Image: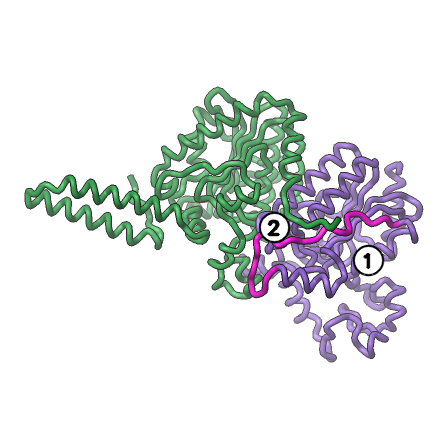
Amino acid sequence: MVEPILLEFEKPLAELEQRMDQIRIQAQADGVNVTDQLAQLEGQIIRLRVDLFERLSPYQRLQVARHPQRPSTLDYFQTVTDDWLELRGDRCFGDDLALVGGLARIGDFNVVILGHQKGRDTKDNIKRNFGMPQPEGYRKALRLMQHADRFGLPIISFIDTPGAYPGVQAEERGQGEALARNIREMFHLGVPILCTVIGEGGSGGALAIGVGNRVFMLENAVYSVIAPESCSSILWRDTKHAEEAANALKITARDLKRLGIVDDIIPEPVGGAHRSPIAMAHTLKQTLIHHLKELTSQSPEELRAQRYEKFRRMGAFLEAP
Amino acid sequence: MSLLDWFETRKKEVQSPVPQPQQQREIAEGLWTKCRGCGTLHYTKDWEINQQVCSSCGYHAMVGCRQRIEQLMDPDTWEPLDELVCSLDPLQFTDLRPYSERIRKSLQSTGLTDAVLTGVGRVLGKPLALAVMDFSFMGGSMGSVVGEKIARLTEIATQRSLPLAIFTASGGARMQEGVLSLMQMAKTSAALERHRSARQLYIAVLTHPTTGGVTASYAMLGDVTLAEPGAMIGFTGPRIIEQTLKQKLPEGFQTAEYLMEHGFVDMVVQRAKLPATLVRLLSLHGY
C-alpha cells in the first residue's frame, strides 16, 4: 500500500507511530518482549487519532476533503458498484473528463452513476481539469440523468469539485445556463436521486448534480457556497483569512446536517477515507443500497414532490406578522 | 466576487476629469446628473424622464427596484407581496463586519427589506407576476429572503396561471448565509420548474450586473431572455477569469450583446422599450 501523505496536523501522531516502530525494532534486536506495552501504546495512538479527527477544525476538514489520496468518483465507481460501463459525451460539443458517468449495477439495482472527477497527480489533474467541469460536463450529466429518467433508473451522483470551471470558453458556452438547467431539470426527473458529497462540494458546480431525494456527506467532506480562500479575498480583501472564512461559512458535514441541507453523514474510517478506501466504499455502498430500497417503491410524482418540499424548506428568514 | 471586480475595472476605465461622485446625483445638489458612460452632464429632471439612460451615449445606469416597478407597471395596479420577509443571520456570520450590521445598514440606506421586490400588477393592461432585484441592497446578493420571495412569487404565478418576469441585478449568492444561500438557487429553480410544467411563460430580464448564483439559476432559465444594453452578465466575474487564466479577455466579453451573439440572450432591449416588448411577448403567447 502507498504511504499516506500526512497533513500538517497529523504529524505529531505520525512521529509517535514512528517512535513506536523504532521501539519494536530495537526490542526485537535486543530480544526483549514489549508486546503488551506496544499494544497499549498502539491503543493510545488510535484513541488519539479518533480524538483528533473528532475535533478537526473546519479548515482541517477542508484539507482532508482535498487530500490528494482521497478516493475519487472513479474509485467509488470501481469499488461501490458490481458492474459499470462508462458513457461519454454531451451530444452537443464534447466529452468533459472532469465529469464522468455511466450505467452501473449496485446490489440488485441498475442505476445511472455520475460525478466530478479530480486527478490523482499533476498529469491526471490536467486531464481532469482539477475536477472543474466546463458546460459540456454538466450537459453530459444532464444527458445521463435524462437517460436514467427514460429507463426508470435511479441516479447516484458523487460530488467532488472545487467548482464549475471559470474560463472564457466556459462562459461563452454558457456555464451559468448549464448549471441552471441541470438544477431545474433535476426537479423534473421522476426517478430516485441520491447525491453524496465525497470530497469538496464547491458551490453551483456541485449543486448542478446535487438536487437529490437524499443528500449525503461523507464525514470529512465539505460543502460551501464559495471556497474559503475566495471568500477571504472578497470579504476580508486578502487571502490570509481562509481559515476564518472556513469557520464562518459553516462547511462541514455536521454544520450542513444541522442546517437541514444534508440528510445523513456517512462515517469515514479513522484518519479519513483515504486511510481505508475499501472500508469507506463498503459503508457507502450499504448506505446507497439501503436508501435505494426505500425510494424505488415511490412513484415519480411522490419523488418529485418530496424533492420539491425538501429544497423548498431550505433557508432562514424572519417574517413580521 | 465578480461585481466588485467589475466596479474596480469600471472605475479605472472611466477616467473623468472631475472626481467621481459617490452617488449619481451629487453635483449641484442633485440638479445635474453625470453619465458614468460618457461623462455628459444631464439635467436631473431630464435624466429621470429618460429613465436614467444617457441621451448622448445610450448608457443604461442602474435603476432601483421601486423606480423600475414605476417605469414598468401601469399606475395603481401594483400589489406588492411578502413585504415583511427579512433577513436573519442564521450563521452569525462575521467578516470585517458582522452580517447583522451589514443588513441593518442596507435597510437604512435603501429603505428596502432585502434585495428584491415582488408582486403582481399590469403592464399596458396585461397581468404579470414580477420580481425586481435591487443592486443597492448588498450588491443584489441572493440570500434566503431573495430565494423565498422569488419562490413564493413563482408559486403564485403558477397557481393563478400568470406569466412571470424577473429583472435580475445581482453579484450572486450572499456569502454571509453560507450554503443556505447556495440552496436558494435550487429553491427558485424548483419553483420555476413547476411554473414551466404548468406551461406558463417566464421572461428573464437581465440588467447590469447579473453574475454568480443568480446567473446559474433563474437568470438563465427564461423561456425568453431579454437584456438591457451593455449589461454585464456572466457566471464567473472577469477579474477571477483573468487571474485564473492570466490572459486578456476578449473585447466586450460578458456584455448583453456578447451573450446574444453566443446564443444566450434573445434580445437586447432599450429600457424605454421594455414595457412594449414585454407586452408583445405576452400577447404573442396568448396572454
Magenta span of residues: B78-99
**Which residue is denoted by mark 2 in the rendering?**
A169
Q: Is residue B88 magenta?
A: yes
Secondary structure under badge 2?
helix
- Residue A115 image position (x, y, % from top left): 51, 37
Host chain of mark 1: B
Q: Is residue A39 above or below residue B29?
A: above
In this view of the protein, which residue sits in the foreground, B128 or A209?
B128
The colour with which the image depicts chain A is green
Q: Quadrant of residue B196?
A: top right
Q: Circle 1 sits on which residue?
A: B66
Q: Colour of chain B?
A: purple
Residue A135 left/right relative to A216:
right
Quarter of the figure that contains the N terminus of chain A = top left
Q: Is residue B92 magenta?
A: yes
C-alpha distance separating marks 1 and 2? 36 Å
* Marked residue chain, label 2: A
Percent across and percent down for residue A164 are: 56, 47
Residue B258, quarter of picture? bottom right
